[in-house]
Image (tube, helix red, strand yellow):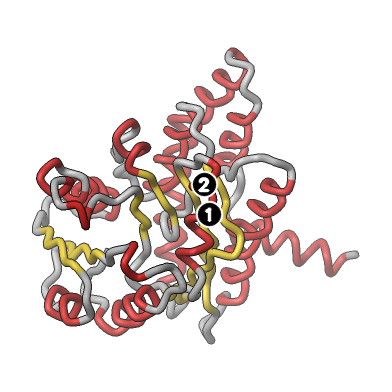
Amino acid sequence: TAHTEQRRRTRCERSLLNQTYPRHLYEIVVIADNCTDDTAAIAVRAGATVLNRNEPDARGKGQALHWALNQLFEPERDAEPERDADAVVVVDADSVADRDFLTILARPLRDGALAVQGESLLEGNDAPGSALRVAAFLLVNRVRPTGRAALGLPATHLAGNGMLLTRELIASRPWTAFSSTEDLEYSISLHKAAVRIAFASGAVLRSPSAPNAEAAAQQELRWEGGKAHLARTQLASLVVAAIHQRRPLLLGMAFELAMPPLGFLVAGLFSGAMIG
């Protein structure tokens, strides 16, 4: 999605145009979500298709995704063969994709995966705490899912950025996640429906860290507030379902909800290393 992020959005589009995945097999679609700048014109010049959304009373990434997925897979659009997509990949407007991002992300589809998550990582900067946030993302979005994949387990969650959803999945499990942690909310619905989330190691997207401590604190507050809400409303039902349905994988999702903030995790890891 894009919302008045011109310079970073251009970097994102260029990286998606410079993929090893065959160019004729994918289309770049920019969601101009309540934009007040020249997002649409710039995206069109770059070779992207633009979906203009003007719904100021329904803001948020979850709302934008819900609207865009309906637009992309509506019957009238399906009638156009060149746009008869098998899947959609969600990339934040400020991210830069490695050249093999799409190639690697699409590989699990051969094994029947309906949802795939790549590696959503952060680029560091000089802001206080930036290195800590970079390490936290590396731990949660690379180390943990890599370990689970090595054990034959699915990923616990979608990261919102760098996720692939198939047409079949969207038809059976429409996007109805509108909280501030819409990716985790949708992941819970997938786990309850016994849909496994595949992890595509090496399908890397990099996003900039928050530019300053204040922005980082606001971002963290939004994420953890949304996660706390989901924990209050979903944690007990996940544990009960895991026990009654004999589905231990649901406990993994419950553990995800109960996990402390990213910064606490990495701070504890560093503290333990120093003590040792």
Question: How many numbered dots are placed on residues in this image?
Answer: 2
Name the residue carrying label 2. Answer: 110
| Residue drawn 50% across the image and 58% down it | 105
**Which numbered tag is attached to residue 173?**
none
Q: Residue 17, how many percent across, how many down?
A: 35, 76
Image quarter in which the C terminus is found: bottom right
Q: Nearer the viewer, residue 108 or 153?
A: 108
Q: Residue 119, how many percent across, how many down?
A: 54, 62
Image quarter in which the N terminus is found: bottom left
* Quarter of the rendering containing residue 93: bottom left
Q: Residue 104, how many percent across, how many down?
A: 53, 61
Q: Residue 108, how many percent across, how many down?
A: 54, 49
Q: Nearer the viewer, residue 201 or 227?
A: 201
| Residue drawn 35% across the image and 70% down it | 23
| Residue drawn 30% across the image and 77% down it | 9
Q: Amino acid at mark 1?
A: Arg
| Residue drawn 53% across the image and 68% down it | 204
* Quarter of the rendering containing residue 28: bottom left
Q: Which secondary structure, mark 2? A: helix
Q: Mark 1: give few (<14), some (14-19) or many (20+) Cα within 10 Å.
A: some
Residue 154 versus residue 49 in the image, above or below: above
Q: Is residue 192 left or right of residue 142?
A: left
Name the residue carrying label 1. Answer: 107
Q: Residue furthest right?
A: 276
User: CB of mark 2 within 8 Å of CB of mark 1?
Assistant: yes
Q: Is residue 31 left or right of residue 228?
A: left
Question: From mark 2 to mark 1, how far is it between C-alphas?
Answer: 6 Å
Q: Mark 2: give few (<14), some (14-19) or many (20+) Cα within 10 Å.
A: few
